[in-house]
Amino acid sequence: MEKIKMTTPLVEMDGDEMTRIIWQKIKDKIILPYVDLKTEYYDLGLLNRNATKDQVTVDSANAALKYGVAVKCATITPNRQRMEEYPELTEMWKSPNGTIRSIMGGTVFRTPILIDSIKPIVKGWKKPITIARHAYGDIYRAVDFATEQPGEAKLIFEGRDGERKEVSVMKVEGPAVWLAQHNKEDSIRNFARSCFQYAIDMKQDLWFSTKDTISKTYDGYFKSIFEEEFENYRDKFKELGITYFYTLIDDAVARVIRSEGGYIWACKNYDGDVMSDMVSTAFGSLAMMTSVLVTPDGKYEYEAAHGTVTRHYYRYLKGEETSTNPIATLFAWSGAFKKRGELDGIRELERFGEIIEEAALNVLNRGIMTGDLVNMTEPGTEVRKVSTDELLDAIKEEMEILF
Ligand code: NAP
Ligand code: MG
């Protein structure tokens, strides 16, 4: 078979440890035999971030904005322990994901990959639930303090051009604790746009929840911006037969549990933090969770939701064969190919991404899986635990059948 040609490069962001090893295996076994791969390569491995004073991370994010589709390997975010492990580090470099997100803007969507033999803890869930978390403000950028004496707290805003607002928060007769939080119009609007854009991409309903019955101005502000923005997407939603559905957060939680899944749930920052852990745990495994950063104007960065799987890497370095799950990283690549193919009108490239996913699911559904999944399968499932290499080989064989 002739190799599939690409016109625009993918922005390739390489990473660290076990996922870096898996990255190369995926390229060698699954991609390079079939695709005339065009990438603009950025090495976000910790040592190269250090050597470039983290410029490589900034450059890679700008490239993602330029070309529109990036695929990222998991990377180490250095902490004190890592500073000892890598004495050559000149600084405790910031999280690459944080840097990329602050340059690209946009929203992270996390979606579980489902297989037949691993049932979600919530019995009714048949289809994935994607969580979109607003990643700015609220309690994450709040100021707070405690006080001892009786007194009054006030909230004051002083506009640069004279606008002034002052309200009494509360008068208290004893010790108390206080918190002020904020959010920004453009951040909420961009969040809304990314969510509508991604719902259209996925052809799935979008849910959004807040507590605007109690927080009438603050959460009401979120609700109104979503309503306003929806007007720009209403026709497209209608054409695709998908809906935008707003409800209160407590009602949303009850509905989510009773639902079959198959939609995108947009959450405010704190709700998204909590609900994404709840949803991902109930669906199974972090190793089966994909993640994509989507900007309001439709730029994409695909990755696995898990980290660099350090413990497996140290076993690998000792020469042991590991059974690390490559599926989420593989789906980051397939997602990027599907999107690049769609944007460039290269149907073969889109199809290639689909074939990777079909093949991977077929293999997993036959019970061939890595160690992390084996213990999660339904009782009575016939499984064969394989190494990372064996799994990728089985997926490649399956792809040959599907082509
Ligand atoms: P992790 O790499 O996700 O691994 C945590 C544990 O989850 C592993 O030890 C392993 O359990 C299991 N696991 C995760 N992915 C797996 C896979 N693909 N296959 C099989 N098992 C898997 O998280 P971490 O240990 O907290 O962090 C390690 C490094 O990753 C840190 O330096 C952190 O900064 C970085 N990190 C990066 C990203 C990112 O780039 N997006 C995200 C999170 C963390 P067992 O060991 O029990 O098998
Ligand atoms: Mg959390």
Image: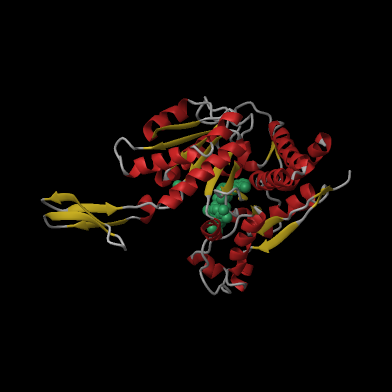
Residue 186 at what x, y percent from top left? 44, 52
Residue 174 at what x, y percent from top left? 12, 52
Tell me: 237 left or right of 152: right
Q: Nearer the viewer, residue 19 or 310?
A: 19
| Outermost residue toward the right in this view | 1
- Give the residue drawn at x 64%, y 55%: 73
Tell me: 368 left or right of 140: right
Q: Nearer the viewer, residue 198 or 138?
A: 198
Identify the image quadrant of residue 204.
top right
Q: Quadrant of the C terminus?
A: top right
Residue 242 at what x, y percent from top left? 56, 30
Q: What colour scheme governs how the chains and residues are painted in the rendered image of this protein?
A: secondary structure
**Can the viewer see residue 113?**
no
- Give the residue drawn at x 61%, y 39%: 201
Q: Quadrant of the N terminus?
A: top right
- Give the residue drawn at x 39%, y 43%: 222
Q: Exactly how many numbered labels are in the figure? A: 0
**Can the viewer see residue 306?**
yes
User: As displayed, is residue 275 above or below residue 104?
Assistant: above
User: As displayed, is residue 142 above or below residue 365?
Assistant: below
Tell me: 275 left or right of 68: left
Residue 86 at what x, y percent from top left? 57, 70
